[in-house]
Image (spheres, rainbow, N blue to C red):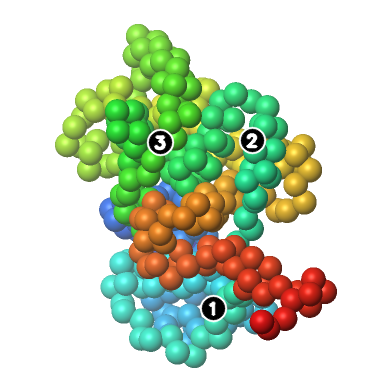
Amino acid sequence: MPSDPLLGEDPAKHPPRLLDQLRDRIRLKHYSRRTEQAYVQWVKRYIYFHGKRHPAELGKAEVEAFLTSLAVERNVAASTQSQALSALLFLYKEVLGTDLPWLSEVTRAKKPARLPTVLTRAEVNRLLGCVADPLLDLVVRLLYGTGMRVMECVRLRVKDVEFERNEIVVRDGKGGKDRVTMLPVSLAQRLQAHLKVVKAQHDADLAQGRGEAWLPDALAVKYPNAARDWAWQYVFPAAGFSVDPRSGVVRRHHLDEQRVQRAVRQAAQRAQIAKPVTPHTLRHSFATHLLEGGYDIRTVQELLGHSDVSTTMIYTHVLNRGGRGVVSPLDGGGPG
């Protein structure tokens, strides 16, 4: 029977399948489920691209051919090609034990220099006034008021909200980094009232023999009872229970981020904002409005969790109003 890289060298003997090995290695590294899903899909596409040949039989030339085809034939975005490259590098290094040489022959997708979409303060106020659901209104206001990414917000735990210091600790943000941002004073009472409702729900779950939140693997082993503790519960839990796709355990997960995305999109339509608006637009607006308010760029960099200040520098474009501060000749502008 021929080998199938998606099944294993000899399906009759039931060896670990390649994709199972990939999943196991990703989980050992504590990568997110989203990363796992993306990497598995890219490895599948790579295998099918080369006629179901096993990746161990392929190498530098085949990887370059696949990545180049994404850029040239599929015209994918630069970030998409980079994700595919990361998936293949992980496969070869972590699963097959092979370090690929520098992939210098890959045609890289061009990353366009685009400025982020930013709302004015008036547009933000109109948007916030058009979020119909009270729960989602609280989430959307937190996104703008803290600069958090949507997944950072829905994954927020009770223990990481510091009411006395008006701080929120963002755990395991992009790049696996922790950071601290502000808790808007105007939202503190609403958030406290919301947590009282969540606490009552958690107590009811415990009474029914449930009430566990998902914990990172190492913590779940080290502190087996922590999953039921109030401190580890999600600030924004889901309305119902769901099955953990990795462990099969039934738990109350966090709020679905797609609900937040829909709420922002619908609010933007109601507010008649003629811009593409997503939850991430609120993060861009948070940073821009802080800079407009006179806060220094290093402070904004820390609040956003950027490793390099050059990433934060993109928001300074709004400070150069009207084309780098130049007055149009139609308005009588000209050198003094």
Residue extending furthest bottom? 105
| Residue 161 horizontal/vertical position (percent) | 34, 32
* Distance (Cα) linking label 1 and label 2: 42 Å
Q: Quadrant of residue 295?
A: bottom left
Nearer the observer, disc 1 or disc 2? 2
Instruction: Report which residue position mark 1 lands on.
Output: 67
Q: Secondary structure at mark 3?
A: loop
Instruction: Report which residue position mark 2 lands on.
Output: 128
Q: Is residue 286 visible?
A: yes
Against 41, residue 130 (above or below) is above
Q: Tell me which amino acid carries mark 3.
A: Leu
Cβ atoms at labels 1 and 3 below 8 Å apart: no
Against 171, residue 5 (above or below) is below
Q: Earlier in the sequence, mark 2 or mark 3?
A: 2
Q: Earlier in the sequence, mark 1 or mark 3?
A: 1
64 and 151: which one is in front? 151
Cβ atoms at labels 2 and 3 below 8 Å apart: no
Instruction: Report which residue position mark 3 lands on.
Output: 183
| Residue 184 horizontal/vertical position (percent) | 44, 35
301 and 105: which one is in front? 301
Nearer the observer, disc 1 or disc 3? 3
185 and 39: which one is in front? 185
299 and 255: which one is in front? 299
